[in-house]
Amino acid sequence: MNLTNNSPVLIPLLFLSTGIMTPVLAMKKEWLARWIALGASAASVALSIFNLIRVINVGKPIHYKLGNWNPSLGIEYVLDHLSAFVILVINAIAFLVLIYAKKSIESELPGKEVPYYASVLLMLCGFNGMMITGDLFNLYVFLEICSLTLYGLIAVGEKKSSMAAFTYLIMGTIAGCFYLLGVGFLYIKTGSLNMADVRAILPFMLDQPAVVIGLCFMTLGLGIKMALFPLHGWLPDAYTYAPSVSSALIAPTGTKVASYVLIRIFYFVFGITFVSKTLPVADIISWLAVVGIIYGSIMAIAQKELKRMLAYSTVAQVGYIGLGIGLANPFGLIGAVLHILNHAVMKACLFLVSGNFRLKLGHSNIFKLDNTIRKKMPWTMAAFTIAALSMVGLPPMAGFFSKWYLALGTIEKGNWLFLAAILVSTLLNAVYFFRILEKVYMKPIDSQSSNTHEQGTYHDHSVKENEETVKRDEVSPSMLFPTLTLAAALVVLGILNAIIVDGVIKYIIPKGL
Amino acid sequence: MTIPETYTSIIPLLTVLVSLAAVPLILLSSKHENLREFWTIIASFIKFGLVVIFLLPNALENKSAVINIVDIFPGVALALKADQFGVFFALISSGLWILTSFYSIGYVRGAHEHKQTRYFASFAICLSATMGIAFSANLLTFIVFYEILTIATYPLVIHKETKEAIYGGRKYLVYTLTAGILLIAASAWIYKLTGTLDFKAGGMFGESVLTPQRAVILFILFLGGVGVKAGIMPLHSWLPTAMVAPTPVSALLHAVAVVKSGVFGVIRVVGFVFGPAIMSQFGLNNILLAVAGFTIIVASFIALRQDNLKRLLAYSTVGHLSYIVLGAALLTPAGFTGGMLHIAFHATMKITLFFAAGAIYVNLHRENISQLNGIGRIMPWTMGAFTVSAIGLAGIPPINGFVSKWYLGMGAVQSGQIIPLAILVLSGLLNAAYFFPIIYTVFFRKGEKLEGLGEAPAIMVVPIVVTALLSVLLGIYPDLFFNFFKLASSIAASIVGVK
């Protein structure tokens, strides 16, 4: 057996097998679950890197026939620049979060480690399958695998999480149904489930209502999954009440995988001419995305719980990706794909920070944060600051560059309203992040006596005492390392973005765009 | 004029990195005050040395050091280019940083400021960003450093952490971040139109791709982008609010880094993005003239009504920045020369005034002009320097303010416009009107409760006297140091295209 040739299938297989085996192997030795998960995740990162290098070297998509059945009969896995890139992003983030997970799971979910890690592995299996498959129905199967585990990962959280998970279950099932219906319509018309086949057949029947309806259903289903405004209803509760590790795992990955599938369907199944010229689907997506950007940002400002704020900010950031997809021009698509990476890193970092708060302070309520945290957790706060600056979109952080590409995309499109929305959201982001930075790095305003400015620069001794008596109480290195790695990655990814764009993302742009 | 040449060199990058490298050292030695300040001082000297020794001689021969660090956008690098204008600005900023550093040490210790480590670290980052702005070879690099400067200044503005400081900080962020996004929009649009982001003396539009409407909108976007830091009205109001910051920060904001980056940006936009030809073709210079003229007059009138010394100086800064903008708007060689000279000369004068205000504050804890009766007698050096600079700002010889103003006036004559000339004259009178009462107050009114008080510590007074002395010497012979005049006129020639 040649491992190199089989590399596309290895990651889903790896996660599937370890996911199923974990409960058995770790039945007696519970500590084993974590190591299995970590090992599988590390291996997946290595394989993803290997796959990406392979694709870059080959320079064109690698098709892998599962069980050696020919595509129209059997299932085909396709490894191209897009799938290889996003797979690496998702697996790398998941790996870092898994390194982080130990203490947080122990404190938030005592005694549930084994099923938790097993679910995580199955979820990753689902994600990877969705991304690598070249088969529309197979994609649905993986979508359901990861959805089912997601419901579980969310439902184990605090009290309100079961309700949140239930909402998500309903919404997710509806999304799955829509997608499946869409696939059904396409299958009736084209007689194939293979993406490449469908792509080849579709141009001859684009005027058929069934095809149009198929596209609409699939878009709707994926829209719910990626939490595109106004289909985001399930997201804020789910991310808020889920355990910290679940939030940190799902927020950066879940919506990104759905975005990836949307790109896949739009650009590689229906073809961009169809979705943008024949039908205004892409336009509708970008309009909704723009509304989502503004709506999500404003809602984020209104939140008092950090995790909920981050959840709404995710709605806004998914809007960036949606906008990039909907712009249907090269810069837009580059922006969208780059933002999948950038946002995954930023959000993972921020959710890890909120996890650190929950572990050390017992809460992540923005209004209870004060300047003692700066002393207690200087490194966590440093990571938070970098991620926040990146979210606001200040150079040289990564966030700036996805915004730059998107801005170029909107100008290419000639839509000034979109450009304005992207830029205004910068200010809105600044509001909700600097609000926290102010609290953490400065003396609380209410403790200052009204005559402070007459005292001039002489400080308020009571506040200073309080600040100095606080002892350092930073999280353990195993938690700090992923948090800081992600923060550092934001700077590195920002400065090196052109290498990523030139080396990988450029090849994603389909011909004729 | 010699033909511009370029050569690859790492010096511009080093110049940017020197103060950045000092930041971790400053943070690490937060427990040892003297060691911490040592890093600041050493970095400031190295930075200035690099500019003077390596970049200036070549710049005088019109050779620019260039370095492409890394591509940050396909086809566009994070690139530094120490052209004449960049070196000119870097000279001023890095030179005055040395003085500000010494002065800061005296000030923060004298006033027992808290969080001094954060203060000096932010200061160092600010200077790195300013060097980056000076040497930016293209708009994207410019934006990167421009935004870094915004963020690095924020901790300085809110330094006191009082209600007013936090309010000032918020206002500062709203204004500067808005400016940042306008700049991003404008640059993205330029890239769409021209396919390049590189600055080019005389303008980056090869063949005209602009329609009148486009040109105006694009110019206004740019003006919004750089105009906030340049304090042009109505975008100026963050500046007086930011006066709550400690005085050396105000000096830094007003003389060394922030607002000067703004006017530097204005000249970059006028001379190196649009170019005089496009500016006059679409009447963009008139927009700029109107804005600058309005700002000069209104800011001077507002300054007349201030009692708080720092606020008065803030409005005076707003007015004088627009002198520079006005110079650029004239589109004549003398106008550009005058504007650029004023970047340098206003810096030496205004920094003296702020230093003096700070010395008064540390020494006497007084901020309002009405409280300053007779202090000239106990602080003769400080107030003497203050007087020299105030006279200079009013444009009276032999202080350097006269020289830059003279060239601005010549620029106005060259362009054949009478209104700018009238504005300059009127503004000179207004400057005199708001400064001379202060001079009268401090020297000729009888003071109270001044017994036993004297000059501020030497570490503060020496920089004050040095900057005042610089103002006088440069007024007598503008080329005395670093060939400011030669550089400025050479840059002006390259922009306008006169051989």
Image (cartoon, rainbow, N blue to C red):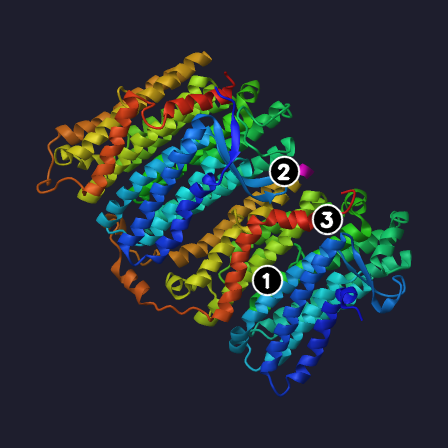
> What segment is highlighted magenta in the picture?
A411-415
Mark 1 surroundings within 10 Å by alpha-carbon count, few (fewer than 14), some (14 through 19), many (20 or more):
many
Q: Secondary structure at mark 1?
A: helix
Q: Which residue is mark 1?
A: A236
Residue type beneath disc 3 = Tyr
Residue type beneath disc 1 = Pro
- Residue A12 location in percent, x, y? 73, 69
Q: Which residue is mark 3?
A: A507
Is B307 situated left or right of B218 in this image?
left
Q: Secondary structure at mark 2?
A: helix
What label does residue A416 carry, if any?
A: 2
Compared to residue B209, the image places residue A320 above or below, namely below
Residue type beneath disc 2 = Trp
Is tag 1's residue or tag 2's residue first in the polypeptide sequence?
1
Mark 2 surroundings within 10 Å by alpha-carbon count, few (fewer than 14), some (14 through 19), many (20 or more):
some
Spatial CA distance of label 1 from label 3 is 35 Å
The residue located at (30%, 45%) in the rendering is B246
Q: Secondary structure at mark 3?
A: helix
The numbered mark 2 sits on a residue in which chain? A
